Image: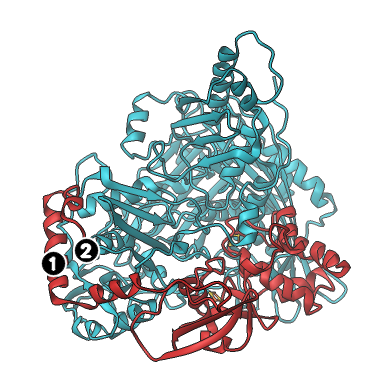
Chain colours: A cyan, B red
């Protein structure tokens, strides 16, 4: 039976947001609170021989300066335990901007003045900040292999082989990284903007060597994250320690210039893609190598550039290799559509180049190369509606009006018009979950589950299920997420947030319904659950459920409780589960300035069943806008002379502003995937961006005849 | 303020000793921390009807300056560090945390408030400049529980995701309407481009402003 679509519903927390009442980490203002400021290293590599903290201590209002000596030795790293927590303060500098001291003061002004008064002395060492020239120092990743790409490539009638590049990029959520810590009544409470309160908690107790049982971390609202706040953050344990050592609450709001240097980022990557097709246009082989910049200790996996491309089409012979080039930089990490932003740009550009070479329409070419199963595993796909995305997008966009020849569509003033299409895919993963639901006779409902709200609308999705499927009073509904004092919390990332809570919510709803039915017995009581409980004189009913990903072993629940990251996917024992999207882009290139504008985008996504239509649509808008920003604007400039980043603020790191965005039409296929999970949903946040940059590049080619293979595509590339 | 010894037991022997050794040393030294803790505890509560003092007293540092201003229609008198930005004054001294810090450099618009009816980025406005002027923040926009048409329009068009840029967007949007810059979608986009929304809610923001502009004219 196909479940009925969920109705449109306003965002659960929108009212508080428009009133300015939503509390983010930095909004905690506690009595007697101190302010902290980190002191970043001004060298890229070497040691701090003296901190020069005396000048800071002379600043009126400065209470303390924390140094590496104020922290315990880092814990020994266990073989198969969790990754070690981030280092705390260090005198051994491994990248520019690494925190070497923390100034704590009575006011923010004094903390800043104190941090600026520090006069550290360094012994510098040579370093490498850029991968250019180091390409031979490859640290190989596990390849992705299907069939025999080399042999079949040799038989291909038509091939393309090109190199594409995606730059270093920073997430830049508008919320700055912030931590507030307080030690009171024997408990250390940390408020932080985090996609993983579990990992934040671990970072605190492991780095400070304190009892996990006394540490609480909460992150009820995050002001955007996009992967930046997924792993444990560098400042968390510093602020926790500051609160312990001073006995007073301490707050740090890290300046954006520092965040650029300590937070994760999208690593620069270079992609060599070789595709082979039959003369009729059937893609039969792909060889694809991706290298990326990497830190000395970093583990953002180069292999995963292949997760999406190998499953975009039914190419039976695929050899995907990848490698790290290690540099003296902070660790790169997961940034919206990690891997897929760069790899779908490269792969979908190459697919377009191949279609052009074959003289085929790029839409028809893609439709003709549809996949029936996962070439990597040979197993079936849980669902795949990429064809539907392409067809619906083409219809809305008016693709059939397209004239194939580049440069043939122009406006009256000579503006060049280009239409491009590209697809994206992203793994649909799922973590285990434990959820607790309590309905009271007093009209209240409290639901606790794992999840973090970064703006994707996770509370709205949960509320959608509870309000739609359980007869409760929406006004009394409280949703508790991102709180280590409630149920076990899994990291919310990788587009698995909804899968990590909504199936569990549905299970809890079923359990609650039968629990109340049992209580009420055969009686027919009019009214909602609260009323029914009141009638049978029962103050409340609580149920607890657990949910596993398909084929996941029950031990995963124990790992979840221990704070592990145990999401499965996209490869499950019996199938592979991917989300898909198709983007249609119109660009206009001004004849004299060569400025590129994007007046029109149609983007259609297949995320299985849509749980919250309104917030899901907003996710697609956001992904498309991220794609436009990455295509035309965003690049972090690495400084080869001194390490660090030259454009470390959002005036110089240019993101899309309102005037860059025009008409965007989004659609969701909304076909449940009941093989993937009981809710029929698949992930959405990342796939919305995957492929947008290729669609823009393909449109620029169609407008100008010029193929741009390096992001961002700027005016100077088209002159 | 000496953390009590028992509380620190939970931290384990190493941290316990570390914390206690340090706090004792500082307290014995009679450092600023101890002195200030007393000062904070003794801060007087404002009497009703009087201009309210800042919720949090000014810490000892820098050049001081007394200011009198009005925030959301209420008189405020406070002594400030002359370097304090209006943004930090609102957030850290008055507990008006609806106004957000996204860059502190005038680049993002998250801190937008109205100063005598004009939109300004409060991070680049010194608190001292609010002397004798009227500040309106996101907390002062609704009429009690009745939302301003712009706030309602932001909900209706889902013109927000994480909500972090939202207070600044709404303050800028209300000003944008009052300035008469809502003649076309392009004009709205242009005049709203000082407010970055990294979540990418621009489509909804433009729709919300078009919608609210029509309703605001009817008021
Ligand atoms: S915080 Fe003021 S403009 Fe960004
Ligand atoms: S809603 Fe997140 S930055 Fe605008």
Say few, some or many: other residues with alpha carbon within 10 Å of mark 2 (under 14 / 14 to 19 / 20 or more): many
Residue A447 in picture, x, y percent from top left: 52, 35
Give the residue displayed 55% in from the left and 40% down from the top: A478
Which quarter of the picture shows residue B172?
Answer: bottom right
Residue A70 can be seen in this image:
yes
Badge 2 element: helix
Residue B187 in picture, x, y percent from top left: 79, 74
Residues under labels 1 and 2: Cα distance? 10 Å
Q: Nearer the viewer, residue B43 or B147?
A: B43
Relative to A374, is A80 on the left or the right? left
In the picture of the structure, the residue carrying the numbered disc 2 is A245
Mark 1 CB within 8 Å of ligand 1: no
Disc on res. A324? none
Image quadrant, ligand 1: bottom right
Residue B155 in picture, x, y percent from top left: 70, 54
Give the residue displayed 47% in from the left and 65% down from the top: A170
In the picture of the structure, the residue carrying the numbered disc 1 is B24
Q: Quadrant of the C terminus of chain B?
A: bottom right
Q: Nearer the viewer, residue A691 or A232?
A: A232
């Amino acid at each position: 039976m196909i479940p009925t679509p969920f109705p449109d519903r306003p965002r659960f927390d929108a009212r508080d947001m428009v009133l300015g009442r939503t509390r983010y980490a930095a909004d905690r203002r506690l009595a007697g609170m101190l302010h902290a400021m980190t002191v970043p290293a001004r060298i890229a590599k070497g040691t701090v021989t003296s901190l020069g903290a005396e000048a800071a201590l002379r600043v009126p209002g400065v209470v303390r300066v924390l140094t590496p000596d104020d922290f315990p030795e880092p814990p020994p790293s266990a073989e198969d335990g969790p990754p070690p927590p981030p280092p705390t303060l260090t005198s051994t500098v491994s990248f520019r901007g690494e925190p070497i001291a923390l100034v704590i003061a009575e006011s923010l002004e004094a903390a800043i003045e104190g941090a600026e008064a520090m006069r550290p002395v360094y012994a510098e060492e040579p370093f490498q900040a850029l991968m250019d020239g180091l390409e031979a120092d490859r640290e190989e990743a596990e390849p992705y292999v299907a069939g025999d790409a080399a042999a079949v490539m040799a038989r291909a009638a038509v091939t393309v082989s090109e190199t594409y590049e995606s730059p270093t990029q920073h997430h830049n959520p508008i919320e700055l990284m912030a931590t507030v810590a307080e030690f009171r009544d024997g408990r250390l409470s940390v408020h932080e903007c985090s996609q993983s309160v579990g990992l934040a908690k671990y970072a605190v107790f492991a780095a400070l060597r304190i009892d996990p049982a006394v540490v609480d971390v909460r992150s009820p609202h995050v002001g955007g994250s996009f992967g930046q706040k997924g792993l444990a953050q560098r400042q968390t344990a510093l602020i926790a320690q500051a609160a312990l050592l001073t006995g007073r609450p301490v707050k740090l709001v890290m300046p954006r210039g520092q965040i650029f240097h300590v937070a994760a980022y999208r690593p620069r990557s270079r992609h060599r893609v070789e595709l082979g097709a039959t003369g009729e246009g059937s893609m039969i082989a792909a060889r694809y190598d991706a290298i990326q910049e990497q830190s000395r200790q970093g583990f953002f996996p180069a292999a995963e550039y292949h997760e999406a491309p190998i499953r975009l089409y039914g190419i039976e012979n695929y050899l995907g290799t990848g490698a790290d080039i290690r540099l003296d930089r902070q660790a790169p990490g997961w940034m919206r559509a990690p891997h897929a932003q760069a790899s779908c740009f490269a792969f979908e550009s190459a697919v377009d180049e191949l279609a052009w070479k074959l003289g085929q329409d790029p839409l028809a070419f893609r439709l003709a190369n549809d996949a029936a199963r996962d070439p990597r595993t040979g197993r079936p796909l849980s669902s795949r509606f990429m064809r539907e995305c392409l067809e619906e997008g083409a219809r809305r966009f008016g693709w059939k009006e397209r004239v194939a020849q580049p440069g043939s569509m122009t406006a009256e003033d000579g503006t060049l018009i280009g239409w491009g299409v590209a697809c994206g895919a992203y793994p649909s993963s799922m973590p285990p979950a434990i959820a607790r639901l309590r309905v009271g006779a007093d009209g209240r409902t409290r639901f606790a589950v794992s999840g973090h709200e970064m703006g994707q609308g996770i509370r709205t999705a949960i509320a959608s299920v509870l309000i739609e499927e359980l007869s409760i009073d929406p006004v009394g509904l409280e949703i508790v997420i991102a709180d280590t004092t409630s149920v076990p919390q899994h990291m919310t990332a990788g587009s698995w947030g909804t899968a990590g809570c909504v199936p569990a919510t549905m299970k809890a709803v079923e359990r609650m319904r039968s629990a109340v039915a049992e209580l009420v017995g055969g009686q027919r009581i009019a009214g909602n659950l609260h009323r029914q409980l009141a009638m049978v004189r029962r103050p409340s009913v609580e149920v607890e459920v657990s949910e596993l990903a398909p084929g996941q072993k029950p031990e995963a629940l124990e790992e979840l409780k221990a704070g592990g990251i145990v999401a499965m996917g996209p490869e499950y024992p019996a199938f592979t589960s991917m989300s898909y999207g198709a983007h249609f882009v119109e660009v206009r290139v001004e004849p004299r300035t060569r400025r590129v504008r994007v007046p029109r985008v149609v983007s259609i996504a297949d995320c299985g069943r849509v749980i919250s239509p309104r917030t899901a649509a907003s996710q697609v808008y956001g992904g498309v806008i991220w794609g436009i920003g990455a295509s035309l604007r965003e690049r972090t400039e690495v400084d080869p002379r001194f390490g660090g980043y030259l454009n470390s603020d959002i005036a110089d790191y240019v993101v899309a502003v309102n005037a860059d965005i025009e008409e965007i039409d989004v659609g969701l296929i909304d076909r449940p995937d009941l093989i993937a999970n009981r809710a029929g949903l698949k992930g959405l946040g990342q796939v919305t961006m995957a492929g947008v940059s290729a669609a823009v590049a393909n449109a620029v080619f169609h407008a100008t005849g010029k193929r741009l293979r390096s992001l961002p595509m700027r005016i100077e590339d088209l002159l | 303020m000496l953390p009590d010894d028992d509380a620190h037991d939970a931290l384990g022997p190493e941290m316990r000793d570390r914390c206690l050794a340090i706090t004792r040393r500082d307290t014995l030294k009679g450092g600023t921390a101890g002195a200030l803790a007393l000062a904070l505890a003794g801060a007087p509560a404002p009497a009703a009807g009087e201009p309210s003092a800042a919720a949090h007293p000014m810490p000892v540092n820098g050049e001081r300056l007394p200011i009198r201003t009005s925030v959301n229609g209420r008189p405020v008198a406070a002594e400030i560090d002359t370097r304090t930005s209006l943004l930090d004054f609102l957030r850290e001294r008055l507990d008006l945390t609806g106004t957000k810090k996204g860059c502190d450099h005038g680049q993002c618009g998250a801190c937008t408030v109205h100063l005598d009816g004009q939109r300004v980025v409060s991070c680049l406005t010194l608190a001292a400049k609010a002397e004798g002027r009227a500040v309106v923040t996101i907390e002062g926009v609704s009429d009690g529980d009745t939302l301003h048409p712009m706030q309602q329009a932001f909900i209706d068009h889902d013109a927000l995701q994480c909500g972090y840029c939202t207070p600044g967007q709404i303050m800028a949007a209300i000003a944008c309407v009052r300035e008469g810059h809502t003649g076309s979608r392009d004009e709205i986009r242009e005049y709203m481009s000082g407010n970055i929304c990294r979540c990418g809610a621009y489509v909804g923001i433009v729709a919300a402003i078009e919608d609210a502009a029509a309703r605001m004219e009817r008021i």
